[in-house]
Image (cartoon, grey):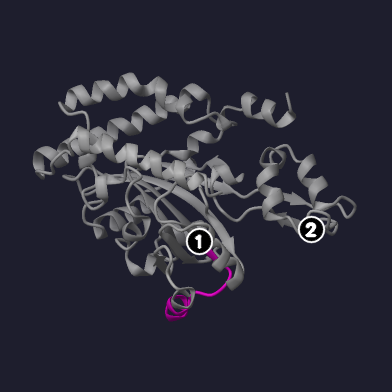
Amino acid sequence: MTKTKFEKIRNWEHWPSSMFYVPNLPYAFYLAIRAKHPAFFSAANPAIKSSGNGTESKFHTIQLVPEKYRPKSVLVKPNTNFNTVLKELNSKNITFPLIAKPDIGFRGLLVEKINSESDLEKYLINYPIDIIIQEFLTHENECGVFYHRKPNEEKGHISSITLKKFLTVIGDGKSTLRELILKDERAIIYLDLLEKIHTGNLNNIPDYNQKIKLTVIGNHSKGTQFINGNHLISTQLENTFDSLSKSINGWYYGRVDLKYNSFESLENGSDFKVLEINGIIAEPTHIYDSKKFSYFQALKAIRTHWKSLFQIATVNHKTNKIPYKSAKKFITEMYELKSYISSIKKLQ
C-alpha cells in the first residue's frame, strides 16, 4: 500500500461521501415520514431550482446575489465563437488570469485558473458544456459560511464557518518543487493534480523560505485544508447574513463560499465577494477539520443541519404554500445529474 493510499484511509476527512451519508439515511427517512413527503427538502429555497440540489445553474444562482457582492462573470455556451467570448469578457472588464468552471458541478470538478487566451480557448474546446468564466479575485482569504433562517422569522443562524488553508510548501533553497511536494504529508496526497498544475515548474528550485501556493481553488478535492472556524460566529456576522438572505427572496438554507480580505470587513459586510451559493446539498464543511472533529461528530452535525432543513422546508410548504417537488421528478433530476457528472468526468 502506498503512503498516499494509507493516509487517505487513516484520515477520515478523505473518506468517500457515502461514508457520511449512508449512515444518516435512517434519519433522512424519519424526516420524510414526519413531512409526509419523500422530497420535502425541495421546498426549502424556492428562489433556486429544486432548492439547490446540484442541478441548478450556478450562473443564474449567483445573479440572485446583490451586484456589490458578486464577482464579474459570463456564461459561455458550448461552441460559442471564441472571438465572441473575448468580446464578452472585454465588455465585463474580465482580464487574465481568470477562473473557468462548469455551470453545473461541485467539489471543484473542472475548476481551473486560466492564465492566457490560448489556455482559455483550449479549455473551452476540451469542455464543450456550459462554462462560467469569472474574474480572478485577489482577496487574501476564503471561507464557507453556512446560514439558515426559518421563513417566518427575522433572524437566522450561522451554524458553520469553514476557514480554507490553501495547499502550500516552503522552499529550502535546495529541493526542487517536486521534492518539496513529495516531502509534504498533505501535498503528496494530491501529487497527480499538482504535477498537472505545475508541469513546467516541477524541477525548479524555490528560494529559501519562498512560499509556494500550490493551488488557488478552495476545494477539498484540490488539496485545500478545511479548518473549523465556528469560534468566529458572532451576532454581527449573523446580522450581515440576515441582510444577504433577505436580499435574495426565497433563499433560506445553504452555504455561501466567499472571498474576503479581513474578517472584520466580512463581519460588517463591507468587503467580500460571493463565489457561489450552495443550496440543500450543501455541507457544513467545518466537519472536515479532522483535528477538531471526530467522524461521529461529523455525522451528528450533518443530521443537525438536516433538521434545520426539515423545519425550513415544512414551514415554507405549510405557511407559504411552496409545493414539494414530486419524488419522481426529483429522482429523475438526480439521475440526470449523475449521468451529466459522469460524462464530464470523462472529459478530464
The answer to which image quadrant residue 197 occupies is bottom right
Closer to the camera in the image, 177 or 298: 177
- Label 2 and label 1: CA atoms lie apart by 28 Å
Q: Is residue 274 above or below residue 151?
A: below
Residue 51: x and y in percent read: 26, 45
The residue depicted at 29 percent of the width and 61 percent of the height is 64
Magenta span contains residue 193: no
Mark seen at residue 100 = 1
* For residue 309, side relative to residue 194 (left or right): left
Residue range of the region highlighted in magenta in the rendering: 86-99
On-image quarter of the N terminus: top right
- Neighbours of disc 1 within 10 Å: few (<14), some (14-19), many (20+): many
Closer to the camera in the image, 61 or 327: 327
* For residue 311, side relative to residue 295 (left or right): left
* For residue 200, side relative to residue 321 (left or right): right
- Neighbours of disc 2 within 10 Å: few (<14), some (14-19), many (20+): few
Judging by the rendered image, the residue that carries numbered circle 2 is 210
Residue 226: x and y in percent read: 55, 42
Name the secondary structure under disc 2: loop
